[in-house]
Amino acid sequence: MADLSIRIDFGPKSRIGPGKIALLEKIEEHGSIAAGGRALGMSYRRAWGLIDNINAVLGQPVVTSKIGGQKGGGAALTSLGITLISRFRAIERAAKIAARRHLTALETETKAKTKTKK
């Protein structure tokens, strides 16, 4: 089935899409940038680079981190990070609802053309 993917462009090289949002969700779930990145198959360095990019794009931090301690470090989303996930997912749902009829039609039309070529 055809699907829709959303990316929000804040300017050249200033994009936030499903991958960065998934990373924020995993950080929230696991309480750690490293564990969030591992859950998505990426290194800590890559995960931190993506978080740094989001912070730069938005001009504010989306994750706060704690260093060391008895239980080790950790990370939590800021209120902006939580809001970003919520708004991105709402935009994504609204866009998918709006596009559903067109995606279904496109899928039907392309299948019909594929069948006539055989």
Image (cartoon, rainbow, N blue to C red):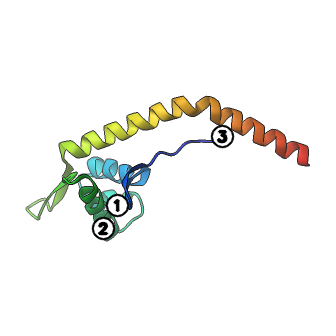
Question: As rendered, which of 30 and 75 lies closer to the eye?
Answer: 75
Q: Amino acid at mark 2?
A: Tyr
The mark found on residue 37 in the picture is: 1
Label 3 environment density (alpha carbons within 10 Å; few <14, some 14–19, many ≥20): few
Measuring 37% from the left and 41% from the top, which residue is drawn there? 88
Q: State left or right for residue 30 relative to residue 95.
A: left
Q: Give whichever of discs 2 and 1 has the lower sequence position.
A: 1
Q: CA distance from mark 2 to mark 1?
A: 6 Å
Q: State left or right for residue 3 relative to residue 50.
A: right
Q: Which residue is mark 3?
A: 1
Q: CA distance from mark 3 to mark 1?
A: 29 Å
Q: In which quadrant of the rendered image does the N terminus lie?
A: top right
Question: As rendered, which of 59 and 65 lies closer to the eye?
Answer: 59
Q: Amino acid at mark 1?
A: Gly
Q: How many marks?
A: 3
Label 1 environment density (alpha carbons within 10 Å; few <14, some 14–19, many ≥20): many
The secondary structure type at the circle numbered 3 is loop
Q: In which quarter of the view is residue 47 placed?
A: bottom left
